[in-house]
Amino acid sequence: MTGNGRLRVISIGLDLTIALSDPSAGSRGDARRRQEEYAELTSSYTAIVKTPCSPAYRAHRWGEGHAVLPTLSPGAWRFPWDAYRLAARVYRERGADLVVTQDPFATGLAGYWLKKRTGVPLCIQLHNDMVGCEWWIRESTTNRLMEPLGAWLVRQADTVQVVSNTIRDRLTARGMDPKRAWNIMTGAGIDSRQFQSADGSELRTKLLGDRYKQIVLFMGRLVKQKDLPTLLKAASLVAPQHRDTLFLLVGDGEERGALEGLRRELGLEGNLEIARGVGPEEAPSYFAACDLFVMSSVYEGKARALVEAACAAKPIVTTAVSGADEVVVDGETGYIVPLRDPETLADRIKALLDDPERATEMGLQGRQLASERYDRKNSLALMVQMWEATAASLTPSPRGRGSG
């Protein structure tokens, strides 16, 4: 640790937008802002990012001691080694108090190699419910092959940043010391003010038009994990009694084509729209414009959209995924329903649509809870505490400093 008591951090991540040669090209994400915010909390912060070998990516400096380095890897198979080599070079040049990795797979492997070589403490982040999660494991052959690596790397870490008590409890049930797991929201919390103050009136008027009176919103990636067919089936059960309700799905992903087909098959053309994804600047207005938020995922870490909806004072209907019970108080700020149960999902949506006053009350209670639990300033302070705890685990390697 440096003399001023602030930490020297090496971060290994996957969000290539922060390494773009033209930063405006990645403006739809807030990763750059978050990384710069983390850098302000340290004396030295180097973000090593997985990128292809392309002139579209280049190294940047964010000030004295703060930088982003692209790996420029010729293939995904080379990334862990490229990331390790860059991390070892940074360690030799300026030292480090800890290395933080974005997942327990490729980035975790690079971080583990650096720890093995130099003794620098390792913090692995688990932003999603993956290690030991049957739904994630069953989703693909790749996941089944990767899960044992993730489980092993988590055991090698000095600390693990999880995003829900569900994930923490699963890891501790497998023998991990509970003191090593820190439950901190992905991105270190939410700036609730932008959701509390957002004006969605103009957008709401546009979406409602002359046809609709209420809006049920989903915002997120259109991927298998979100189990959106269950949401569409629930919408088909709600629509006959609520012809004036618009189900609006906002997002991008490989499931768009299948969802468009299911929309036609279920006869939802008049009640359900699938819009393109929007950036973080536009998202608050969508939450402000809707009447309730719904999510049908089969697994999550802690869905950021749930917290954003709560901060926007919207009642929520969500499946019982990891982190849901930390955002939603069932029956008080929304409803938590079983996985892959369109009938119960539809019943809870109807209950909120049929009682708008109760829905508004639930949303206000949810906003108070979320504003207290996910305050960004408090989350950032907790993250620094986790980094300090990680750095305190330093056990110098007998091999000395890394040699790249």
Image: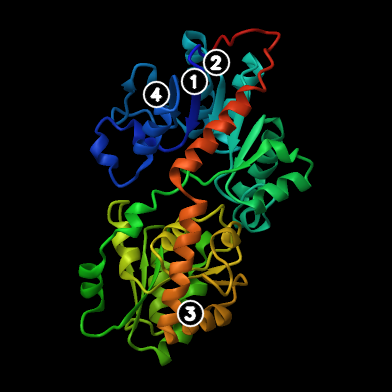
**Camera-side mark, 3 or 2:** 2
> Which mark is drawn over residue 349?
3
Tell me the residue at 35%/43% (across/down). Answer: 30
* Measured Cα–Cα span from mark 4 to mark 2: 22 Å
* Measured Cα–Cα span from mark 3 to mark 2: 52 Å
Tell me the residue at 43%/32% (across/down). Answer: 38
Residue 213 is at least partly visible in this image: yes
| Mark closest to the chain's N terminus, 3 or 2 | 2
**Camera-side mark, 1 or 4:** 1
Q: Percent x, y for residue 343?
A: 56, 82
| Mark closest to the chain's N terminus, 1 or 4 | 1
Amino acid type at mark 3:
Ile
| Mark 3 Cα shell of 10 Å, populated few (<14), some (14-19), many (≥20) | many
Amino acid type at mark 1:
Arg
The residue identified by callout 1 is 6
Query: Quick check: 70 left or right of 119?
Result: left
Amino acid type at mark 4:
Leu
The residue identified by callout 4 is 69
| Mark closest to the chain's N terminus, 4 or 2 | 2
| Mark 2 Cα shell of 10 Å, populated few (<14), some (14-19), many (≥20) | some
The quadrant holding residue 45 is top left
| Mark 4 Cα shell of 10 Å, populated few (<14), some (14-19), many (≥20) | many
Q: Percent x, y for residue 64?
A: 35, 16
For the residue labelled by badge 4, is the local secondary structure a helix, a strand or a loop? strand
For the residue labelled by badge 2, is the local secondary structure a helix, a strand or a loop? loop
